[in-house]
């Protein structure tokens, strides 16, 4: 039995599957990854992405932040790929109970997934810091300079910047989902970003699967490790 067949068998036998995903899930949709060879770290900017995407930078150099944000973070023409679509299909079939994602692109919801815990927020939610009015991602993309609400308040993306805390309600939901599932699939993440990566420690089952292009810190404790593109691997799953 090859690894894909084994994965298929494990999913069939599982009662509740949770998927924990990172940037590698979205790179197949054309969204750049921070840490890969072709990612944002290897492109040239006046400041490194981690500096730009910090709360200090947002409030200190807001216009510079938005120049980068519109250029690199708002990939609004991206479409769900085979991984997003298969996960939505697994949820609809009653196998998948939740998606826990580090991505902010909203592609899981676009593919049809209903229960998605967005650990780092979403570019599709933006709010006025003064009156609380909401603005969509298209508004942000088409804005210029520093976007302000009609009330004069600064508009901020609902994404977790470096230096900010994760939303406790989202964390609690993700922890409950991971702790209660009997199969956890980790895909498209190096498990290097904390505190998000630490959530997998709540898993107590014996069906831990890791699908990634490179090795991760959790490989040694996994029941199945598949090196490959997440979309290509999941697209072979037959319910």
Image (tube, rainbow, N blue to C red):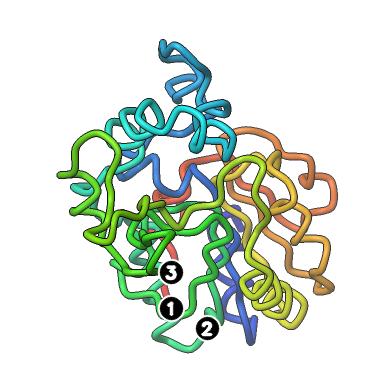
Residue contact at pointers 1 and 2, CB within 8 angstroms: yes
Task: Choose between 237 and 155: the one closer to the eye.
Answer: 155
The disc label shown at residue 95, or none: 2
As helix, strand or loop, the secondary structure at mark 2 comes to: loop
Task: Kindly report which numbered mark, 1 or 3, lies closer to the viewer in this rendering.
Answer: 3
Q: Which is more N-terminal, label 3 or label 1?
A: 3
Residue visible at 33% across and 65% down in the picture? 85
Q: Which is more N-terminal, label 2 or label 3?
A: 3
Percent coordinates x, y for residue 73 in the rendering: 36, 39
Q: Is residue 223 left or right of residue 71?
A: right
**Would you place residue 11 above or below residue 223 in this image?**
below
Q: Is residue 125 left or right of residue 8?
A: left
Task: Choose between 84 and 171: the one closer to the eye.
Answer: 171
**Would you place residue 53 above or below residue 197 in this image?**
above
Mark 1, Cα crowd under 10 Å, few <14 / some 14-19 / many 20+, is few
Quarter of the image containing the N terminus? bottom right
Give the residue pinned by disc 1: 239
Percent coordinates x, y for residue 76 in the rendering: 23, 49
The disc label shown at residue 87, or none: 3
Task: Kindly report which numbered mark, 1 or 2, lies closer to the viewer in this rendering.
Answer: 2
As helix, strand or loop, the secondary structure at mark 3 comes to: helix
**Would you place residue 191 above or below residue 13 in this image?**
above
């Amino acid at each position: 039995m090859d690894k894909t067949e084994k994965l298929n068998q494990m999913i069939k036998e599982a009662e509740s599957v949770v998927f924990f995903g990172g940037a590698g899930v979205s790179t197949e949709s054309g969204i750049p990854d921070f840490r890969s060879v072709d990612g944002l770290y290897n492109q040239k900017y006046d400041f490194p992405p981690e500096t730009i995407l910090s709360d200090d930078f947002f409030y200190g150099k807001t216009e510079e932040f938005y120049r980068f944000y519109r250029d690199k973070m708002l990939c609004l023409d991206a479409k769900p790929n085979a991984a997003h679509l298969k996960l939505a299909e697994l949820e609809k079939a009653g196998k998948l109970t939740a998606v826990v994602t580090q991505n902010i692109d909203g592609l899981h919801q676009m593919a049809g997934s209903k229960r998605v815990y967005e650990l780092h927020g979403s570019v599709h939610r933006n709010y006025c810091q003064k009156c609380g009015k909401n603005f969509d991602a298209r508004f942000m993309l088409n804005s210029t300079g520093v976007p302000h609400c009609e009330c004069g308040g600064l508009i901020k993306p609902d994404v977790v910047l470096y230096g900010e805390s994760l939303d406790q309600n989202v964390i609690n939901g993700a922890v409950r989902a991971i702790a209660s599932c009997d199969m956890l699939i980790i895909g498209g993440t190096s498990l290097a970003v904390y505190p998000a990566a630490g959530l997998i420690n709540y898993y107590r089952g014996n069906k831990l699967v890791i699908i990634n292009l490179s090795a991760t810190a959790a490989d040694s404790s996994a029941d199945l490790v598949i090196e490959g593109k997440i979309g290509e691997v999941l697209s072979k799953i037959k319910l």
